[in-house]
Amino acid sequence: MGQSAGLVQPVNAHVLSQRSWAGNATAGSASLTASDVMQGILNRTGPGGAFNDTWPSADQLIAAMENPQVGDEFGLLYRNGVAFAMTFVAGTGIVAGTGVLNVAASISRLYSMTVLANKRTVVGVVTTTNTTLVLTNVPKSVIQQIMPGMGVTGTGIGAAAIVLGVSEDAQTVTVSVASTATADNIAVTFFPRVRLDSLGSLAA
């Protein structure tokens, strides 16, 4: 990922074709919006002490993109304009990648965000079987909205499970972590994922 005149350049221009300043002056911890992190530069001011900033969910980021594809990458220069440290908190579907994601006082950090799964969040009712990786009795209408790489959560679903494969004919979804219970009619949420990497820091 290159830089030009201090602006973060996206790898794929159709994902983020223009870069501009966004400002968030919340006086304390904040839940950042998709607009905050997709403008290209975020100027963070307001806190009077150490604070947490929670990233928007991957679903919110996907919704804000124009035709996002798996592998699309875009950048953010996060400028911590206060003399207090920011602790990064991941939103749903945001995967902590490489590098330090927190931002020290009066420091700017350069982030890269990469789309790992681009389908929107969907909830389906499934059957889980203890110690197995396969979810069964998944409605075909739900399977059509699922793809490998999506995250999965719900009662009896293994922690940090990811979709590995789907079969519309068999009405099954294979995930990366075995279920922890056997039950029918379990509401399960499938959601997109975006990886966040730190590329380094510089003085704000």
Image (cartoon, grey):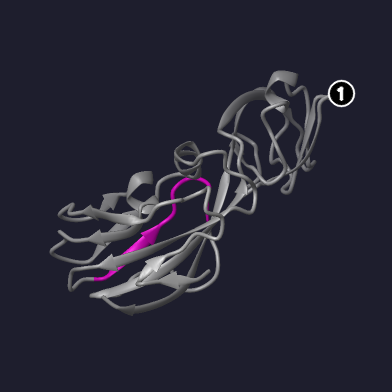
Secondary structure of the residue carrying numbered label 1? loop
Res. 120 in view: yes
Q: What residue is drawn where x is 32% and y is 72%? A: 108
Characterize the local packing of mark 1: few (<14), some (14-19) or many (20 or more) Cα atoms within 10 angstroms. few
Amino acid of disc 1: Asp
Q: Is residue 135 above or below residue 102?
A: above
Tell me which residue sits at (58%, 26%) in the image. 123
Q: Residue at x 47, y 70 (%)?
A: 198
Q: Is residue 33 visible?
A: no
In terms of image quadrants, where is residue 151? top right
Image quadrant assignment for residue 152: top right
Residue of label 1: 169
Q: Is residue 134 left or right of residue 66?
A: right
- Residue 146, position in %: x, y? 68, 33
Q: Nearer the viewer, residue 71 or 194?
A: 71
* 1 and 110: which is toward the camera: 1
Give coordinates of residue 93: x percent, y percent. Answer: 53, 47
What segment carries the magenta color? Answer: 85-95
Expressed as whole percent of the image width and height from the top left, the position of residue 141 reads 70, 19
Q: Is 37 inside the magenta-drawn segment?
A: no
Percent position (x, y) of residue 81? 20, 68
Name the quarter where the C terminus is drawn.
bottom left
Q: Indicate whether residue 93 is drawn in magenta.
A: yes
Residue nearest the observer in this picture, 36 or 19? 19
